[in-house]
Amino acid sequence: MKFLSMKAILTFALFFSITAQAQWKSYIISVRGDTLNRVDLSGKKQGPWVVHLEELRGEPGYDEQGYYVDDQKDGLWVRFSLMGDKLAEENYRWGVLDGRSKYYTRLGGLLREESWRAVDPNKTMDTVNVYDLKDPTKVIDRVVVKLTNTTYKHGTWNYYDPQEGVITKSEKYFLDKIQTDADIKKAEIDDDLKPLDVAGTSKTKKDEEAKPEAKKPQAIIDYEKKNAGKKKIKSRDGNTGY
């Protein structure tokens, strides 16, 4: 009886394995038994992948591993030299760079950090946060932009001395446009001069000067003119204050 039960279990496991593998057009099995480099029946790459590229025409080879969703890179991808040294950590969304990417020397020193912003390829417009240049954690505005690329340099890029581990240069980008010192200075000046208008009701001095005075009714004008020379006569203008 036990033999029959074990046989049934093995038969079910074999059937499940064949059924699972039948959904892939191609795949490989890792040394640990994992199913990698899967291509579904529609020809799209899915799930965990490993890529091996040999040295070619003087260009160094590398090994790369990450994840595919519907034929597009998704999430963290890590690249190594053929000697096993980590060269890069890149994050992807919709198949393009998104978020932080880090690049290293063959000795492990950090070379640079990049910041990217991927956009939905099905959208032509997007709303982007504008951060305070003096406080990158503070959102000061949101703007609608027309999209022309699928990923943009967006945020702070840092370049390092790989031996000392200190930043040697830093750049700030807004949708591929680098923010210069002049831009930062202008933003600081504008920020000092521009009043904070949370409710959208603040008025400038020019607005106040341009505002016409409320015109008195003709009956009140005639009454004031008639009693202009008399004492202890108060004109009534509708004001209820003191």
Image (cartoon, grey):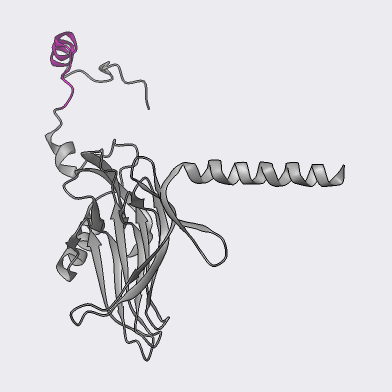
Does residue 214 show up magenta in the picture? yes
Where 72 sits versus 110, above or below? Answer: above
Tell me residue 242's x, y (percent). Answer: 37, 27
The residue lying toward the viewer, choosing from 94 and 65, is 65
Q: Quadrant of residue 125?
A: top left
Quarter of the image that includes the N terminus: top right
- Report the residue at 61% width, 41% height from top: 15
The residue lying toward the viewer, choosing from 50 and 178, is 50
Where 206 sits versus 165, above or below? Answer: above
Q: Quadrant of residue 59?
A: bottom left
Does residue 42 show up magenta in the picture? no
Where 218 sits versus 194, above or below? Answer: above
Q: Which residue extends farthest top?
A: 219
The residue segment tinted magenta is 213-226
Tell me residue 176's x, y (percent). Answer: 19, 59
Tell me residue 219's x, y (percent). Answer: 17, 8
- Report the residue at 34% width, 41% height from top: 198
